[in-house]
Image: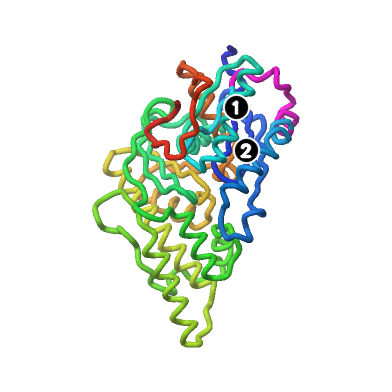
Amino acid sequence: MRDEPVVLGIETSCDETGIGIVRGHTMLANAIASSVEQHARFGGVVPEVASRAHLEAMTPTVELALGRAGLRLADVDAIAVTAGPGLSGALLVGVAAAKAYSLGLGVPLYGVNHLAAHVAVDQLEHGALPKPCIALLVSGGHSSLLLVPDVARDVISLGSTVDDAAGEAFDKVARVLGLPFPGGPHIDRAAREGSGAAIAFPRGKYDDGTLDFSFSGLKTAVARWVEAREKAGESIHVPDVAASFQEAVVDVLTRKALRACAKYDVQDLLIGGGVAANSRLRAMAQERCDAAGVRLRVPSPGLCTDNGAMVAALGADLVAAGITPSGLDIPADSSMPITTVHV
């Protein structure tokens, strides 16, 4: 295999079919086919709909990525695929496709962890990861704090959500406010016209001494606040509610992340996952990192959401580290723990 092998990454953990191609830490292509519009009328992702959309989009999206990279399938040196965590049916489509490409091309296969891939993708923009670093991963399904000595070999869980993930709370609050799905971008946009100090919403597990998160109570508090105003016949200023809710979420996320950096004496914080595209989270994290003397790394918004480039990036790390490839019998594991970087 070449010193900087060409790795094709396949991501199908939820509602986006992502195909990425990298050479080492250089991104050659990142193509995404999203089925989000098919789920919007249901107010959330429907697993069966997502699985069928992945099946239909797989081959065209691979061809699109290859075209953008100016490559042929024969130029690919390895295949990486999200093997978990995620929706079972959606994962199965990606894993089955990856096995077929691996077998057909005669190249090694690497089944990788979706969350670790969100860490690895930052290298495509900002270079090799500091060892160690703290990673805050926030998305629709996950809110996790990780200590990452080596993303290809060793990822340690420090804390996670005990109920709703941050992105899930964004979706549910958006529904309460009459905003479209997915809720994150719409709340972020509405919040720019409101005040984050307008309403004192609660901060779950704010001073509990742990590195865990809880957003279910906050979500309920917003719903009850809106319900009470509606019953009283009062008007609801959506931007203020959105901004106050968003402020509560990012306050907790950044507070816990900086607490982890201090506790483990780590000077580098990485934020990844779909919620990392939130403008207020990025701004508050930068402010608090600057004050604490911590270096902050956040990928561009397009690489925060689920994509194939992040899977390819982690695959390239595994190849470079000399990790044994996966077998063709690897399963799709919907509940894969973060400590399992590859299978």
Which quadrant holds the N terminus? top right
The quarter holding residue 220 reads bottom left
Q: How many marks?
A: 2
Q: Which residue is mark 2?
A: 18
Q: Quadrant of the C terminus?
A: top left
Whole-percent x and y of residue 69? 71, 28
For residue 47, the mark is none
Residue at image point 39% right, 28% down: 150
Q: Are marks 1 and 2 in contact (CB under 8 Å)?
A: no
Determine if the magenta segment contains residue 232: no
Cα separation between marks 1 and 2: 12 Å
Label 1: which residue?
98
Which label sits in the foreground, 1 or 2?
Answer: 1
Q: Nearer the viewer, residue 251 or 179?
A: 179
**Relative image position of residue 115 (x, y in whole percent):** 46, 38
Residue at 42% across / 39% down in the picture? 335
Residue 340 against residue 218 in the figure, above or below:
above
The residue range painted magenta reads: 64-78
Q: Secondary structure at mark 2?
A: strand
Of labels 1 and 2, earlier in sequence is 2
* Camera-nearest residue between 268 and 41: 41
Quick check: 45 left or right of 229?
right
Q: Residues within 10 Å of mark 1 (few under 14, many from 20)?
A: many
Residue at point 35%, 67% (across, down): 202
Residue drawn at the location 55% of the way across and 66% of the way down: 192
Q: Is residue 131 above or below residue 17?
A: above
Q: Quadrant of residue 60?
A: top right
Secondary structure beneath label 1: helix
The amino acid marked with disc number 2 is Gly
Q: Is residue 239 left or right of residue 28?
A: left
Left or right position of 150 against 87:
left
Q: Amino acid at mark 1?
A: Ala
